[in-house]
Each structure stands twice: as structure tokens, then as C-alpha cells.
Image: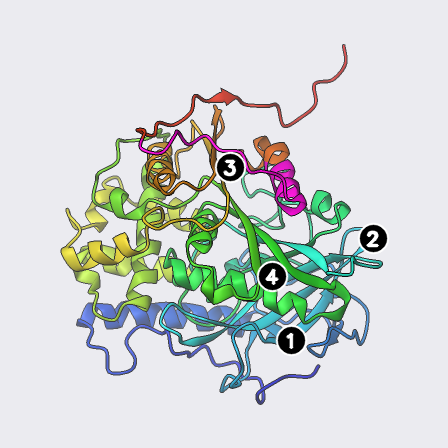
């Protein structure tokens, strides 16, 4: 395996670790950061590496067979193979530079690779990021293949929550909340085989801090968007993909927020040509949500604990991104201890821990968000700038994770700039079922963007008050058997 920029190391230190570079933390926050580091180190030290697998230099030339189809686990979760340990120090390379590849099993008629590549955080700090690339075999059009970038939903803050760590990550989406999932998180890409059949390259980032070392800057939208942009640039450096510059991004939840943000901020991705952004239940309204400016949405028995788990993930990511913020301003002492879980656990495990140990979930949180925190949350809220490409938003009415009222607020803001925005509300769809229920719509919409068709919109005429469209009946995800 050829590696750019020096030798590999098992160190988990990187420049995003909370508490370094002279940052002043209260004693409790030092303890929280230390607990997270110890837990992460334990995962690295107790996990085994994958069996020897095909690796390549950054041109994508394979040196063996695809990676083994079984992966060791740690307490039911993925171990961290050496592939995910970046060179130390990081090479002085442009963001988007491909550092390392490892071929893995792909759907029939395609090839797939794990990738390690350079990216940047919101403040320009270079980081290594992992993901996967899947491409059809055979000849590509002269201008190169179209690219679909997948931005996955919330998996949690632990390194071992990265979707690409699965033994066979290049598969159609395997939802954690299904009976046939053996995983602790979602794995794969929705409609992957349909995209490959259409001739597209598919690339899926893990985001920095999942798989690779460091603190994931969860819902810090420039950091997440940069990771997506750079995954496409890395895919272009694998010769076999023949990936061109035309791309569409499809995101879900956390990744939905990143996808609509990318449409507002395309300069970082140049010369890539973003033709559209499609978002499933996007996390695009954090500012108003934390300010309690959004009417309550649907809830079920587990959603209060899950909501607290998500809030703690937001706080942990923002503490990594913005040195001036203080944990004690938004969480109680008990909440500071819980932040260690946000740093090391996949989100569904974390929510279950909260649900199993507390009856008063609010005991982890301060009663209000202070001004300095609210400012940063508002800065990471989409819809206040003009999108530069058509947008498709898909939201279920029964979503207990992303509040449908918040999604509607994003839509109402974004419509004010005159760009085509199609908002489809699926009656009865939940956060977990929306990728299945809306699949026909986003597959067709993405094909239309690549073909240059006029983009649909549900926005009203300029100057009109925007209101969400009426929900449509949710299509059945499974064909009805014949009588």
C-alpha cells in the first residue's frame, strides 16, 4: 500500500481534539474529554484489523483481491482497521487529495473502494476523511460519468460508527431499524444499484471523525459539506471511476442538512458542477429549533431520549468547532458526563443508554441556550442564503427525529430566493422509512437534473407567502402480492 505524507500511526490525536492549543476548559470538561479519549483509544487497541485486502496507490491500480467479507467487531460494533489511521503528520496536500484506497466487494457489474482522502474543517484545518466509492464497469461517456454524492444521516460520535467500516459497505441501504440488519448503524446507500444501472459513480463520505481520528463536527455545516465535496474530488482520482464534474448530492437527516448547505456554498467545491441537492428529512433548522421557535412535531415513546442524544451530539460537535463555547453553558454537570457517550457511542446505543438510566431527560440540559451558542447554531442553519441549484426536499409527517415543522420553516425561507424548490410531504412516513418511500421521486429527480430537464417547484410566485404543500399518500415500499 502506497501512502502519501509519511508513516501511519495509531495515535488518535488530531488538531480538533477539545482542550488542546491552549484552550481553557473547566475541570469537568477536561474530565469529559479525557473519558472520551480513553474510550476511543480502547476501541482502537482492542479491535483487530481486517484480513489482508486489496490496496492501491491513489491512481486506483489494484494490488490484490477485494477486501474480506467479514469484519471483526468490538462489542457488536466495528473495529478500526489500520487503513483508517492517517499519515502523521498529514501530508501538505490540497483538500480532495486521495491518500489511500482499498478495493471491496461491489454489486455485479461495478467496482468499489474504501477511500482515505484530505478534507478541511470549517476553519480550514486539514483533516483526513474516509468513505467509499462505487463505479460501474465499462466505458464512460467522453465527458466522464455523472456523480451522486451520498451524505448519510446521524450515526453518532464514535469512530466505529462509520458506515464504510462494514465488511461490505457498497450495498443498497441497510436500515438499522429493520429486522434483517446485523449492524449498530445504517450501512450502504439508498438506491445504489439503481444509480449504478444508470451509469453514475456513487461516493459516500463517512464525515471527518467517523472512521478517522478526531471529534466529528456534527451539524457544523461547512465541515460536513467540505467532506462531501472532497469525497467527489477523491473519487475522480481513481482512474477506473472515470468520474466527471457533474454531480448531484443526496442527503438524509444530518446529511440532508449538509446537502442543502452545499447548494448555498459552492465555491469550495469548484470546479465540480452541482446540478441539484436532494434532501431527505434534512437537519436544516437547528437555530430555530434550539431557540424553541418551532411548533412541536410528532413524538413516540423513545423520541424524548433520542432528542436529548441528538442535542448532546450537537453540543459535542460545536465544542470541537468553536473554541469560545463552554459546555457548562448548555448542559448540567450530569450532562457533561453524558457528553463522553456522545463522543464514543453510536447514536441509537446512546439514546438507549439515556432512556434506560433516566426518567428526567431534561436533567442533562440547561434550561436555555445562551447567546454565543445561539449565534453559532443560527450560522449553521440553512435557508438564509440563496441556493444556486434546484432543491428537492422530502419529509414524512410521522417523523419523530427531524421535526416536520422545522423542515417546513426551512422551505419557507429558501423559497424566498426564486430558485426551484420541490417540497414533497409523505403522509405517515417516519424518519426511517422516508428513504424507501421517496425513492422513486429522488431517483427520477436526480436523473432529470443530469439530463438538463426543467426543475419542478412548489414555491409560490415571488412575493407570495409560502406554505407547505399538502401531504401526498405514502407509497407502499413493498409490492402487494397478487390475490
Task: Give the residue furthest to the top.
Answer: 483
Quadrant occupied by the C terminus: top right
The image quarter containing residue 480 is top right
The Cα atoms of the two marked residues, 3 and 1, are separated by: 32 Å
Magenta highlight range: 442-463
Seen at 53% across and 85% down, the residue is 91
Task: Give the residue furthest to the bottom.
Answer: 6
Q: Do the residues labelled 3 and 4 touch (CB within 8 Å)?
A: no
Seen at 50% across and 21% down, the residue is 472
Judging by the rendered image, the residue that carries numbered circle 3 is 432
Seen at 63% across and 28% down, the residue is 477
Quadrant occupied by the N terminus: bottom right
- In the rendering, which numbered label is found on residue 257? none
Q: Do the residues labelled 3 and 1 touch (CB within 8 Å)?
A: no
Disc on the earlier residue, 1 or 4? 1
Q: What element carries label 2?
A: loop
In this view, the mark in front (1 or 4): 1
Is residue 295 a member of the stretch shown in magenta?
no
Q: Is mark 1 on a helix, strand or loop?
A: strand
The Cα atoms of the two marked residues, 2 and 3, are separated by: 29 Å
- In the rendering, which numbered label is found on residue 100? 1
In this view, the mark in front (2 or 4): 2
Within 10 angstroms of label 2, few (less than 14), some, or many (20 or more) residues?
few
Whole-percent x and y of residue 411? 38, 37
Amino acid at each position: 500500500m502506497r501512502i502519501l505524507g509519511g508513516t501511519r500511526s495509531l495515535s488518535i490525536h488530531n488538531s480538533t481534539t477539545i482542550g488542546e492549543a491552549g484552550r481553557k476548559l473547566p475541570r469537568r470538561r477536561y474530565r469529559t474529554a479525557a473519558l472520551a479519549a480513553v474510550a476511543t483509544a480502547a476501541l482502537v487497541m482492542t479491535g483487530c484489523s481486517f484480513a489482508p485486502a486489496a490496496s492501491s496507490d491513489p491512481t486506483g491500480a489494484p494490488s490484490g483481491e477485494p477486501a474480506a467479507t467479514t469484519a471483526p467487531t468490538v462489542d457488536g460494533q466495528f473495529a478500526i482497521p489500520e487503513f483508517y489511521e492517517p499519515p502523521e503528520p498529514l501530508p501538505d496536500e490540497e483538500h480532495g487529495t486521495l491518500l489511500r484506497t482499498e478495493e471491496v466487494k461491489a454489486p455485479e457489474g461495478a467496482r468499489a473502494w474504501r477511500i482515505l482522502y484530505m478534507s478541511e474543517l470549517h476553519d480550514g484545518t486539514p483533516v483526513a476523511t474516509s468513505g467509499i466509492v462505487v463505479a460501474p464497469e465499462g466505458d464512460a461517456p467522453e465527458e466522464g460519468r455523472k456523480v451522486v454524492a451520498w451524505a448519510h444521516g446521524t450515526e453518532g460520535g464514535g469512530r466505529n460508527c462509520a458506515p464504510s467500516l462494514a465488511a461490505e459497505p457498497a450495498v443498497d441501504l441497510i436500515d438499522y431499524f429493520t429486522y434483517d440488519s446485523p449492524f449498530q448503524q445504517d450501512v450502504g446507500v439508498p438506491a445504489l444499484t439503481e444509480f449504478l444501472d444508470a451509469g453514475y459513480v456513487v461516493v459516500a463520505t463517512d464525515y471527518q471523525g467517523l472512521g478517522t481520528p478526531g471529534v466529528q463536527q456534527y451539524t457544523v455545516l461547512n465541515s460536513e459539506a467540505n467532506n462531501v465535496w472532497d469525497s467527489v474530488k477523491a473519487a475522480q482520482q481513481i482512474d477506473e471511476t472515470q468520474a466527471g464534474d457533474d454531480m448531484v448530492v443526496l442527503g438524509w437527516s444530518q446529511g440532508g442538512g449538509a446537502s442543502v448547505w452545499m447548494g448555498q456554498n459552492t465555491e469550495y467545491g469548484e470546479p465540480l458542477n452541482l446540478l441539484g441537492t436532494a434532501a431527505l428529512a434534512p437537519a436544516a433548522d437547528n437555530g430555530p429549533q434550539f431557540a424553541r421557535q418551532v411548533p412541536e412535531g410528532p413524538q413516540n415513546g423513545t423520541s424524548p431520549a433520542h432528542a436529548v442524544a441528538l442535542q448532546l451530539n450537537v453540543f459535542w460537535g460545536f465544542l470541537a468547532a468553536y473554541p469560545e463555547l463552554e459546555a457548562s453553558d448548555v448542559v448540567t454537570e450530569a450532562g457533561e458526563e453524558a457528553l463522553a457517550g456522545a463522543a464514543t457511542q453510536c447514536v441509537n446505543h446512546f439514546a438507549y443508554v439515556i432512556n434506560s438510566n433516566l426518567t428526567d431527560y431534561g436533567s442533562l440540559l440547561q434550561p436555555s441556550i445562551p447567546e454565543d451558542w445561539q449565534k453559532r447554531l443560527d450560522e449553521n442553519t440553512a435557508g438564509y442564503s440563496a441556493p444556486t441549484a434546484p432543491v428537492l426536499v422530502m419529509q414524512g409527517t410521522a417523523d419523530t427525529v427531524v421535526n416536520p415543522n422545522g423542515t417546513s420553516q426551512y422551505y419557507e425561507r429558501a423559497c424566498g430566493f426564486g430558485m426551484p424548490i420541490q417540497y414533497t410531504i409523505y403522509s405517515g412516513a417516519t424518519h426511517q422509512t422516508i428513504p424507501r418511500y421517496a425513492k422513486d421521486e429522488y431517483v427520477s429527480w436526480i436523473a432529470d437534473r443530469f439530463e438538463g430537464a426543467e426543475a419542478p417547484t412548489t414555491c409560490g410566485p415571488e412575493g407570495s407567502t409560502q406554505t407547505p404543500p399538502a401531504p401526498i399518500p405514502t407509497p407502499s415500499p413493498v409490492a402487494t402480492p397478487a390475490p
